[in-house]
Amino acid sequence: MAERIWKAAGWMAVGLLIVLPGLSLVLQSFANSWRAPAVFPQEFGLRGFEIAFSSAGAIGAGLDSLAVASATTALCLVLAWPAARALAQCGIARSPLVVLVIALPLLMPPYLAGFGLTEWFIRLGLDATVIGLVLAHTVLALPYAVIILTFGFGSHLRELEEMADLAGLSRLRRLAWVSLPSVRPTLATAALLSFLVSWSQYGPSLAVGGGRATLPVVMLPFIRTDPQVAAALGMLFIVPAMLVLVWAVRSQRNPL
Amino acid sequence: MEARDPERRLTRPGGRTAVSQHLGLLPALAVLLLLYGGAVLGALRVSLIPLGGGTGELTLDAWGAVFADPTFLDALAFTIRITVIATAISALLALLLALSVRDRGLLARVSSAGPVPVPHLLVATVAVLWLAPGGIADRVLGGLPLNPIRDPGGSGVILVYVFKETPFIALLLLASLGRSVRQREEAARVLGANRLQAFTWVLWPALRAPLLLGSLIVAAFTIGSFEVPLAVGPSYPQTLAGWAFEATRGDLISGEGEAAAALLVAGALAVALAAISARFARNVEGG
Amino acid sequence: MTDEFRKPGRSFAAASTLAAILLGVLVFAGCGGEEPAPTASVQSFTEIREEARGQTVRWWMFGGDARINEYVDEQVIPAAERRGVNLIRIPITDTAEAVQRVAAQRRAGKTGGGRVDLIWINGENFAAGKEAGLWLEDWSEGLPNSKLVDFEDPSINLDLAVPIVGQEAPWSRAAFIYAISPSAVPEPPASFEDLLAWAKENPGRFSYPAPPDFTGTSFVKQVVIEMGEDRAFEYLRELQPLMWSEGERFPASEAELNELFANGQVDFAMSFNPNFISTAVEKGQFPESTRPLLLEGGALVNTSYVTIPADASSTAGAQVVADLLLAPGLQAVKADPAGLGIPSVLDRTRLDQRQLALFAGDESSPYLLEDFGDTKTELPAERVAPLEERWKREILSGG
């Protein structure tokens, strides 16, 4: 009985906090006119999406963002995996300076990136290039990936790997059949966050990318000035991110 | 490398295995140090050397101006206040959320993580759409008793952050509640432990670290962000990053120096927080 | 655990510190940089046009106004293409972002090949860049279409009381006007005193954005211009408790004030964009009954410009685009009340019959004012920051 009440309360909370605001965003994107005191839009229309796809260039910007975010996620995971293994072996608390360097982009204000990164990347000749942008995003997402992965490399994984060694598996097989499936939930979470960090980056895309039009760059100016277009672009922004979220959450179940 | 004997690994002499294990850190560290380290040092330089000056023009003017400005100190106090409140509430709610949602189906777990992929500014916009005077809630209910938007106490900012960060921390917690934890929990129940004991002895040790970490990340982010306070926070006092943002408006030359200084103060605050939590975690773990 | 695990940790600490020091030396040593050549070389415009062919011009401009974006995409970019210039519109949220990018390029020691070729700019952002020497010099009066502009006019050769000295080219006219809903305000106030009287009878229905927001500062400036600084602050203090939210909260920007107006929280909106009502109605934000209003029989008149950073990669192309923006054809399209309705910066007396004809036959719009009344004299630039400080002290925290 208590279980039922709990469940009902949970769904009500989800409805109120997630579904309703989400619906209002959808409504806003289709609302050519929505002012007080009307609870529903006075006028529906496709103006938001028309503008989003034409002058805002949502498709091009979206594909751009997708490419950069995917590259960032891949690079992050490749760099984070060995780093997280090393940290898990020696214990995070043992090398505070190392952890500080890794966590620095997390601890410093995001706005600082605008000051420092741009100038530094220009000096390094990395600005206005795709690789430079991917590197800038990677730097900002790496702390999340490393720290989350470190939690996945616990003693449990070590036991499993030792068993695999005893069974005589090659390193590659051990990686594919034991290590990867075992850390799937944390790997998925790390991938999700790396992707989201890159997907939502605004400052570096403009500053380091030299004005490269990614989806956040196109969307942000409309927020507060043109709510309908902002909502339309917002939906185009959220959908791929949601898909990655669903994949990550599914992977959080059933680890080895 | 050959298959390793677990005993041999611990007793192997010399630091070779240890070093080669540390080697894995090298690529990540190199990238971060080279690319981000340079950025932080660049910001430091901006705070010490005005635009167009050479190394000879090192000056502490910007730092002095920043700390002498009462609006900056108000911003510092305000930032600390909303950080503490927002982080504490998010951490608590995240714990409850993770525990209630971990046994549920995919739909429940995805919906509870809904706010995570939504950008902060979009959440702020929807908050304004609903909670501002003349907003949807006002229209449906015919009047709201409180207005969190631009509330001088910062409740609008706290609200948006709690909404965004609770599912984020919960996500981290859920990622740490794997099968091994579940197995130990079941074992404990079989051995006769009740719910509270199972929590204290099995769940809490597994959740402690990600909870602390998640809270640290949220705190650091709150200390340094300015878009949400810009959208729903009070005109005064500002947050540190909001203060920095405004400092660049009037005079570009001195403004950028002061802004960089303010941002570095915010960063230092977050680093101090991290150091404290690291010490706290170490004491709790027992070395 | 054993010592062997601690040693590598320490050596890492040492290595990282060393690397950090090295980095520090690198970052601090290479600063300053040589002065970039700020003046456009003495070329005839024909030579500039030739050089511009095949160049790519990156125009950084505010990206949140769908109609201006459309105008640029559909009118300006094709026109540029016909001159062989590849114009790319880069959307930004705030002009300061473009200025910061140029400043970062300067700090990194770049003297050319910059990623910002043209910026839609005025006011503080221009002044800040000018003081830092970021803009190309002496080019705007040499454009062929510049002869159609009256550079003697103080509202053109002074950008918010800062001399433009050929560093920016005018693009659009601006005037500070107000918006009201005639049903809510059947007898619109004509002066600030009238406004105060109206506020006494209708408390909580008026607000203005908090300085240092541009629109808010402009409102405060207009009050100061009308009645002198001390009397103005007396007035604002008297007005404060009669304002929306009892003067304890202020919208942070023009966009927010527009939201309040749209949601029926206040009965007045204001902006330096003379076409802001038309834009808002088209967006579905303002009701169609909204009408423009002038206070004190006149308005602060302003111009918005385009400027070229000194280190731009395509200075010739940028100048060609700036010249294009002043072409009577493009200015007429922009000024069409049925469309954007942004007044032109061209001096009508300098246009010939054919060019004047482009502007003729435009129907008026109820959302646009044809005449901005008396032009108010701008305050000197150095008075603005102290005014904003005083407002913060006396109104915002004083309150």
Image (spheres, coloured by chain):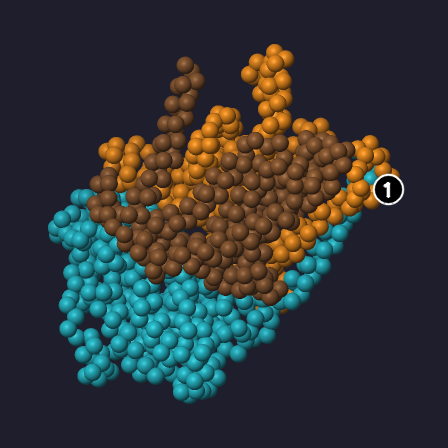
Determine the residue located farthest toward the top in the rendered image.
B192
Q: Which chain is orange?
A: B
Where's residue A185, x and y in %?
Answer: 57, 36
Q: Check the picture and name the quadrant holding the N terminus of chain B.
A: top right
For chain C, what colour was chosen? Answer: cyan
Q: Check the picture and name the quadrant holding the C terminus of chain B.
A: top right
Q: In the depicted view, which residue is nearer to us: C375 or A64?
A: A64
Where's residue B81, x and y in %?
Answer: 49, 37
Determine the residue located farthest toward the right in the rendered image.
B13
Horizontal arrangement in the rendering, residue B221 relative to residue C61 (left or right): right
Q: Amino acid at mark 1?
A: Gly
Which quarter of the picture shows residue B124? top left
Where's residue C126, x and y in %?
Answer: 42, 67
**Badge 1 is on which residue?**
B14
For chain A, what colour was chosen? Answer: brown
Q: In the depicted view, which residue is nearer to us: C270 or C119?
A: C119
Q: In the depicted view, which residue is nearer to us: B38 or A42?
A: A42
**Residue B251 shows up from this direction:** no
Whether C282 is drawn above or below B165: the answer is below
Q: Residue at x 47, y 68 (%)?
A: C116
Q: In the depicted view, which residue is nearer to us: C217 or C348?
A: C348
Number of dots carrying numbers: 1
Whether A156 is drawn above or below A103: the answer is above
